[in-house]
Amino acid sequence: MAKLTINDEVREIDVDPAMPLLWALRDHVGLTGTKYGCGAALCGACTVHIDGEPVRSCQIQVREVVDRKVTTIEGIAGRVAKAVQTAWQKLDVVQCGYCQSGQIMNAIRLLDQNPKPSDADIDDAMDGIVCRCATYVRIRAAIHAAARDLA
Amino acid sequence: MWTTTISRHDSRRPAARLTRRRFLQGSTAAAGALVIATTIDLPPGLAATTQDPPMPNAFIRIAPDNTVTVLIKHLDKGQGVATGLTTIVAEELDADWAQMRAAFAPADATLYNNLFFGDFQGTGGSTSVANSWQQLRNAGAAARAMLVAAAADLWKVPTIEIKVEKGVVAHAPSRQRATFGELAAKASTIPVPTQVALKEPKDWVYIGKPLPRIDSVAKTTGTAIYAIDVKRPGMLTAVVARPPRFGGVAKSFDASAAKAVKGVVDVIGIPQGIAVVATDTWSALRGRDALKITWDDAQAEARSSEAIFAEYRRLAATPGLPAARRGETAAALAAAAKIVEAEFTFPYLAHAPMEPLNGIIETKSDGSVELWAGSQFQTVEQATVAAILGLTPDRVKLNTVWAGGSFGRRATPNADYFAEMAAIAKTLGRPAPIHLVWTREDDLTGGRYRPMVLHKVRAGLDLAGRLVGWEQRMVSQSFTIGTPISAMTVKDGVDETAVEGAANIPYAIPHFAVDWHHVTSPVTTLWWRSVGHSHTAQAIEVMIDALAVAAGRDPVAFRLDMLADHQRHAAVLKLAAEKGGFGEKLPPGRGRGIALHESFNTFVAMVADVTVGHEGALKVDRVVAAVDCGIAVNPDIVRAQIEGAVGYGLGAALRNKITLTNGMIDQSNFNSYEPLRISDMPSVEVHIVPSMAPPSGIGEPGVPPVAPAVTNAIFAATGKRLFSLPWETRLLRST
């Protein structure tokens, strides 16, 4: 039995402590907003926040996040998160949408750290999150829009 | 850029004729569809209504709560059809956009067939809006007429005095008003009209406007449900170990270590490989890792990519099956003042949609089954599952959910992963729902690639620099020959999906011959976003650019001279050249190129700007596109599709290839098959040509012109001509 704090809720799940957090979230906690894309930290679709830091949940084991604060797309809150989601919706960034949880989780952290990122800052911070629909033009635009909104 | 300009001529339009049969069929079946809609778990953003009357046909439900749900007969895998099709209905219905909902239609080819595919429900060929356009306008107009008739009857006023606006039916003289929801029950008793008048384009309030996507909120909050997110009570997860070489089969397997993995429930042999079934995904994957399998590779592809291309080259030295012929090409080339020739090679490409293939199959107590998937070829999937399980197709209930991309991969003539689901359900002998999941490695090594292709082109100019002769030989596999789809695609032995874009080149070239060699291999292939155009546009548009240079002509003028009979081609070419500043002088190391291609009845020209560094580092800075897709139902989605297509085509051209070494696939994940990333993405500017032509495709047509526009820009920057894809940028090093 592993005791995890996910989206400010304590959840006890009966899984092998070596299970990647991604599969624990999806198959055992029932939070499916975090997506599987590659299983090897190459695409970022599984990005969650652990103590506020973006982490590839396919690469971290359940045992490593006990006593740490896990936040998924379903649990994001606050000014920055709201601004990012609003910008994403306003600019209709999504196409298939499958990678967008990871994009949004990563973008929130970028704006937390850098309230006014340049295109180069965005490319640098977001390069790990793959979008096969290539919505990148709008991801850039939405991050700028969220930054303006937060300024 | 979109402006609705309607000529007097365009605005005269006859009332659409509806066949009685179609509507009777529609209204009867809507009752059946209703049952299905109330029992499936609809994802948020696709909120279907319950208890809604079957009103007025298979495509529209108007509920007492005043929501209008459009049944979407196509898969939305990101291209935005759920929004586009809903828009068409909302327009003719004069609904309020806020009351519109969308729900994926059930699998039922009698109601929801793709009108371009015959008796077949499916999504592909960029046909979703094009084939639904008149159908949904008629459906919306019929529903509106029934609401008006219901109000007239209720209020005892003439229908002609009733106006409908933003979801409100009103009779001004008597000050009566009602919502659609209030009228729905009564309207459903009104006979379905056999003839309806459609709105004139000048009266459109939604079509041609950038309405927000219907799925944006669900897809930005993690609440949109894809197949991979569907949970059923007692569900088990299955992964399959497939032969590492194409054409191989499992000879024997030892499952003891796999079965010892905690969570593994069973290990079974199925025709496609060995399936490991477990209580969750991770256990299934660990179980598969522990399998010991002996493969029989006697019939397998054992060659390497170089050997395969060598075979293609040998074949290309001889004429193949004629795909197009006009004039006397050999004589014209013999008499030409100047010859330009080139070889182009194209690798296998994986589609690599972000959501890997997966689906759920659940066996019911009566032996029927229910499935959930990002279903793209519903009719063949339903029939395939039925055949494997010995059921009639009506006992295979198929629920379509949002798909995390496809790019062609989810549409297979043999319903590949559905066959795996059915085989597992049949063999396992347990009633539990099964979720079949492919990993990224399964996706990249599992085949159904865009075929490897070789083109050899020889073209000749006369003394005046006119293009007089063109000979093109192509070599590739076919993914339609030997399947039922060949009835639509194969003529005189030539697979049109292999030669499209080349056999029907728009340029007026007097002597012209295109040949195709059909090769076979156990490696499975498939349409990949823009299909044959994904390679023919590169071969043609790069050759044309090289010929313009050889002729000492401006590439735009050179093309325009040969497009007198193709005004829509010419118009996008001129628009892209103008907006992209084609012909302007750029600083050293930078270059600007242009390309033009029509696919799926949509015309796209692109101007690409590149910077090439001394070490051959290639950066695509900007792409300016001009698009004529007929009426742009949602111009913002048109723009988005072109932006995405630029990225999709560019990513493949930059560095993607699936290669074989002794039959084994060399790539396995996104480190060896590296997708386009945000730092690779150019800015994209899209200009939509105002048009009143019926809407054509938009999901695919943005892909073909990207690679040749960039190839031609690289030449402009460096004087070096790359032909094949992906680009060998090492050839661009200055030293």
Image (cartoon, rainbow, N blue to C red):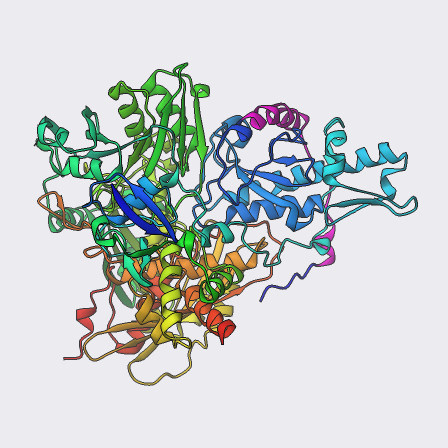
Q: Considering depth in this image, is B461 or A14 the residue closer to the camera?
A: A14
The residue range painted magenta reads B7-35
Residue at 63% x, 53% y: name it: B207
The one nearer the camera, B732 or B651, is B651
Spot occupied by residue B271 in the image (x, y as percentages of width and height): 21, 25
Residue B648 belongs to the span the image colors magenta: no
Quarter of the rendering occupied by the N terminus of chain B: bottom right
Whole-percent x and y of residue A57?
27, 53
Q: Name above or below for residue A73 compared with residue B525.
A: below
Residue ID at (24%, 66%): B722
Label the magenta part by its dominant secondary structure: helix
Which residue ends up furthest to the right in the rendered image?
Answer: B173
Left or right of B596: which side holds B187?
right
Residue B101 at least partly seen:
yes
Position of residue A15 measured from the top left corner of the image (x, y, whole percent): 24, 40
Quarter where residue A132 is shown: bottom left
**Is residue B526 in sight in this rendering?**
no
User: Would residue A117 appear left or right of B282 to someone viewing this image?
Assistant: right
State whether residue B174 is above or below residue B587: above
